[in-house]
Image (spheres, helix red, strand yellow):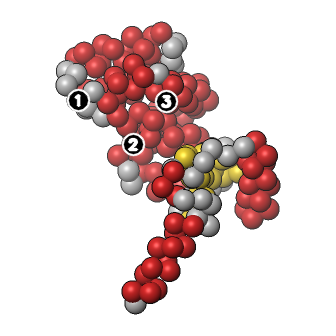
Amino acid sequence: MDHSGGTSANIQASLAGRYATALFELARDSKAIDAVEKSMSAVAKAVGESADLKALTTNPVLTRTDAKKAIAAVAKAMKLDPLSAKTLGVLADNRRLGETVAVARAYTALAAAHRGEVTAEVTSAHTLSAAQMKALSAKLKARVGSDVAIQTKVDPSLLGGLTVRIGSQMIDNSIKTRLNTLAAAMKG
């Protein structure tokens, strides 16, 4: 049974999502879903932690050839699976290395949906503590009725609170949104 209908339709709507969907289909056909997920997560983490790798993915003056060579070297050094390495090569070819983290995120959501897991994208003003994550996980489980994998993002412009997106459903209790809603109501 496939629960991923809504998830994959949402994911395919974005550019990164189209790459992630293509990668996921290849991974599924080669029985490499988990290996690719591990590789893509490792790359996303590395882009976040390494200034050099971040520069490589965002450098507009790097030629395609150089970007491709550099990302191939990174893939080799990180011992990425062949499908992930190839996908990064295609991103380099199309001058889309800046989408690497978004592709990795979208891929993780597709893999989770394939396993029947529900993934919630949680955006908060500050990094959540382990205790807050645990409480949030329990709340979401109660609401959804199954375990929920949580992907977190920090957005300081939220002014407090957090937004949670499960598939296309937005659950929001951020101050910013409430202020915007109030401002809209006052204008009307």
- Viewer-nearest of discs 2 and 3: 3
Q: Which residue in the protein does label 2 denote?
A: 16
Residue 61 location, quadrant: top left
For the C terminus, the image quarter is bottom left
Q: Look at the image and tell me whether residue 165 can be seen.
A: yes
- Residue drawn at point x = 63 percent, y = 44 percent: 127
- Residue drawn at point x = 53 percent, y = 55 percent: 7
Element at badge 2? helix
Q: CA distance from mark 1 to mark 2?
A: 18 Å
Q: Is residue 97 shown above or below 144?
A: above
- Viewer-nearest of discs 1 and 2: 1
- Residue drawn at point x = 77 percent, y = 59 percent: 139
Q: Position of residue 115 (x, y in %)?
A: 66, 44
N-terminal label among 3 and 1: 3
Residue 60 got which mark?
A: 1
Badge 2 density bin: few <14, some 14–19, many ≥20, Cα 10 Å: many
Amino acid at circle 3: Gly
Q: Position of residue 120 (x, y in %)?
A: 62, 53
Badge 1 density bin: few <14, some 14–19, many ≥20, Cα 10 Å: few
N-terminal label among 2 and 3: 2
Q: Is residue 170 shown above or below 38?
A: below
Element at badge 1? loop
- Residue drawn at point x = 29 percent, y = 18 percent: 68
Amino acid at circle 1: Pro
Q: Nearer the viewer, residue 182 or 4?
A: 182
Q: Which residue in the protein does label 3 denote?
A: 48
Q: Position of residue 18 (x, y in %)?
A: 38, 44
Q: Nearer the viewer, residue 5 or 78?
A: 78
Badge 3 density bin: few <14, some 14–19, many ≥20, Cα 10 Å: few
Q: Is residue 73 shown above or below 5?
A: above
Q: Position of residue 24 (x, y in %)?
A: 49, 37
Q: CA distance from mark 3 to mark 1?
A: 18 Å
